Amino acid sequence: MFRTDLTEQPSLFAFTVRDLIAEDSDVWLYIDLFDALDLEDFDGDYVSQGKPGIAPKLMLRSLFYGLTHGIVTGRKLADVCCNDSRYIVLSGEQRPDSRTFQRFLIRHAQRLDALFVQVVRLAQKMGLVSLGKVALDGSRFKANTSKHKAMSYGRMNQALSEIRSDLTRLKEDLARENSSERTEPESKLEGEIKLREKRLAKILAAKASLEKEHGEEVPPDSAQKSFHDHDAMPMAKKNDAFIYGYNCQAAVDETSQIIVAADLHDAPNDYGATAPMLGEIKANCDKAAERVLVDSGYRSNENITTIESSGSTPYVATGKGEAQADDGIERDVILTKGPDGAATYLCPAGKKLRGYANKGEGTLSARLPRRACKTCPLAGGCPLLRRGKRIRLPKPEHFVAVAGNLARMRTPEGKAVYARRKVIVEPVFGNLKNKGIRIVVRGRGRVRTWWRVAATAHNIEKIIRSMTASRQSALLAAACPG
């Protein structure tokens, strides 16, 4: 059914390609790891007819060894599978080309998602995942397109009118030309018409995608869409620049920096990614994290409540970025409920706040009782007076969670726990980007699979390092038994 691993067959002089690999090379650890993984699902998609295919195990170990060693594209991977003895051994001396790797990723997209979960659970069994502290963050990866291959909605409408006008004129010229004799087998006008029709179809597809995103509303003229990747989002960068990219989310465990959940988020900001990522953590590891650490990009009353309802303790930044500023006033007010269940907020002196207004994102706006404040004995040190005429409050259903998070983050223990967020998750994205990991596919579905594959490669690298340390310890114990 599959081609055999030729590197296991001895040559005339009892020599194989495997003899070129040093005994202490990590190639052997990758071979052992993929022998231990359950890859039976990958084999079931092949038939016995026709030319035998390359065994999925050989493809997987070549692919992931390449990703962990900075080989990202299919062309480079195909090149090293022909010229590098390590990849020749890993690929079973089958020399797959770039299209074979591309078709393999498309064919096994769902199985690669399951492989990510399998690797996470393997790391969990090895003690590399404890779910004591899990840091959640997102990073922007540039899409496989260019901002120069995009067009705004206003320009699309203008371009469509111009192209349709040109097509009408060119077809009339072609009709006049066909009515007379011509010596050339194909007119230049036919080529011009084909070029404009192709351009017209591309703009119409991008326009339809943009209108679908905005639903019943008409997109603003400034809204843009990339021709090469309709799912890529325009994302702001420094110096008023922007790129087309994807928001790649990762939840990283503190013990060995294993990515326990990886997914794409449909917005440049991280605000709405909290609930889906918490669900991914629980589904992949069969339990929730004890503590969830997130920066101010995830800060909202709903997200704090969501983290608590999932069974985790939230540690959400209270200031801008990593700052732990006391910019919330929820701890300075008192929430009471009357006999009818209506919520009322009181200032520290027990005076009722008035003028409630819904401000969205789970917050209310309230007005201070200014007349009572003038004669209040606490006016000299009242923190509410420094907020201005109006203050923002969490809605009653979020009050306990938000106030608890603020109180927790002001304690020395809370500050020490949150200080670990940066060293848990930030090096993971740095490691991936320093290896040259980038988006080489197009479309949200394929990019999501790519991100899961990149996260799986990162986890495999951590597992291999653990196996290396265990092997070195065993060798040391064998050499020095005393």
Image (spheres, helix red, strand yellow):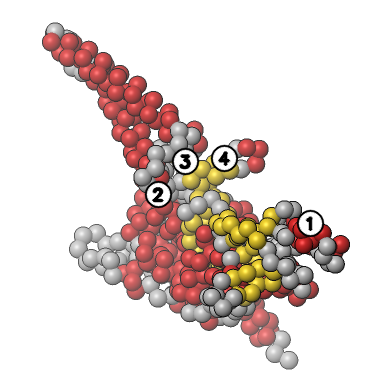
Instruction: Identify which amino acid the numbered label 1 is placed on.
Output: Arg
Dot 4 surroundings within 10 Å: few (below 14), some, or many (20 or more)? some
Residue at disc 1, secondary structure: helix
Closer to the chain start, of discs 3 and 1, is: 3
Classify mark 4: helix, strand or loop: strand
C-alpha distance separating marks 4 and 2: 19 Å
Q: Nearer the viewer, residue 379 or 339?
A: 339
State the separation of the CA atoms marked 1 and 2: 49 Å
Which quadrant would residue 105 be assigned to in this image? bottom left
Residue at image position (56%, 78%) is 339
Inter-mark Cα distance, 2 to 3: 11 Å
The disc at residue 443 is 2
Residue 6 appears left or right of 69: left
Of the image marks 4 and 1, the number of the one nearer the N terminus? 4
Which of the 4 image quadrants contains residue 330?
bottom right
Q: Which mark is residue 145?
A: 3
Q: Between tags 3 and 1, which lies in front?
A: 1
Which numbered dot is residue 386? 1
Q: Residue at x 59, y 70 (%)?
A: 343
Q: Quadrant of the N terminus?
A: bottom left
Residue 62 image label: none
Pointers 4 and 2 in contact (CB under 8 A)?
no
Query: Is 125 placed left or right of 423 in the picture?
Result: left
At label 3, the amino acid type is Thr
Camera-side residue of 478 and 72: 72
Residue 175 pos. (x, y %): 17, 14
Residue 186 percent across, percent down from the top left:
21, 18
Q: Residue at x 42, y 59 (%)?
A: 449
Q: Closer to the camera: disc 4 or disc 1?
A: 1
Nearer-N-terminus badge (2/3):
3
First in sequence, mark 4 or 2: give its number. Answer: 4
